[in-house]
Amino acid sequence: MRTVLVDSFDRLTRRPRALVALGAAVTLVLAGCGSDSGGGDSAGGGLPATVKVVAISETTGFAGPAGKASENGQKVAIEEINSSGFLGSSKLEIDFKDTGSQPAQGVALLNQAIQSGASVVLGSILSTVVAAEAPLAERAKVPMIYLSSSGEFAQGSQYVWAATPPADQYFHWQAEYLRDKNAKNVAVIYNSDVSSTQKWADSVWPQASQAAGLNIVAKEASPTSATDASGVVSKVVAKNPDAVVVLASGTANNAIVLALRRANFTGIIAGSIGMAGAVNPLKEQGYGVVWPTNFSNLVETQEAKNFVDRYQKMFNALPNNYAAAAYDEVWFLARALKEANSTNREAINKALQKVGAAGFSGALGKLQYKDNVSQAPGLLIEWRDDKEVPIKGYGN
């Protein structure tokens, strides 16, 4: 078996990468030894009886809620793929491992997989983990499909793929919604230690607000580690905004929303894709929060309903967008494996190109990959009655 050695950590000096909001990493480990290109069977050599999958997932740490949801979505896809005989006599088998929301741990687990002959990787959601993983996969020429909501890690890459549609493209619906609700002055609170939320605060949201005729009257930074956001919130509330836009990752959303409620803020609270799952434990205190996303479990397409039904049967709960993106991610891989009929890295990457260009219908809707980045319809949702309710007229 050919072994590919990679650095233990990459400081991202070779090319710029944005840090992204949250997800689960999955590494497909070979069930065989390889060709000259490394990693698996020879091109067209057929799939092994068991295709073993290692899931490197953020199931603990501040990204834990998103990582756990993604893990569950992957489990649903694997159960469906195996029970339907989609890969013929071959079965997918998964082994989950936790990064603890730590980049170094994610890189260590990824290195172990690559050194043991990994032929394809499904990368993390959490931006700091993806930022460290992606250069390693690109250097090793191992196809990697990640779940971060930014396409920047994949754009310009040959082997790196973004399975979650970029969150950037949905913010204009949020700005239009605030405008239609007669909000004029808006404040922004964002995580200063996550590059994606920093980017949204610095450029994406200001552009969307300007286009909608909104004024940003305050912009305050808050780290993901902050459990008490009262200080930042007090500065924002003092500006008397009509709405507060929260651009945060994972459980950092909870602290900010709770602080706004305790400060008796009566305006609209708008969030980002990171609200999914994080706002659920707040129950009534989270009601009324709106955010742009790529999925709601109330969407009534055949593919979405099939996914929701299967998820409910397995976990007795409703899935969120992280689970849906991970479900589609595994199906993207399964389609490529079927097309390649091989665990050879180059064969899989070519199959990903073919499947991605053709597109397919998934839980997120009609998916197609452009410049290695997933594109799909999105929508604006409101958290109320313990449900993510689509707001009509804003992307749906």
Image (cartoon, rainbow, N blue to C red):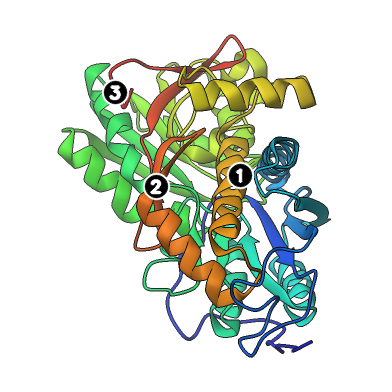
Q: Is mark 2 on a helix, strand or loop?
A: loop
- Identify the amino acid type marked 1: Ala
Q: Which mark is residue 165?
A: none
Q: Name the residue under label 3.
A: 177
Q: What element carries label 3?
A: helix
- Discs 2, 1 touching: Cβ within 8 Å: no
Q: Nearer the viewer, residue 109 or 2?
A: 2
Is 206 situated left or right of 336 in this image? left
Q: Nearer the viewer, residue 151 or 208?
A: 151
Residue 319: image location, x then y, percent: 64, 27
Task: Report the residue that reaches farthest toward the top.
Answer: 385
Q: Which residue is drawn at 62% across and 48% down?
A: 330
Query: Could you classify mark 1 by the number of other residues whose Cα lies within 10 Å: few (under 14), some (14-19), or many (20 or more)?
Result: many
Q: Residue 359 carries which label?
A: 2
- Identify the amino acid type marked 3: Tyr
CA gap, disc 1 to disc 3? 28 Å
Residue 23: image location, x then y, percent: 63, 50
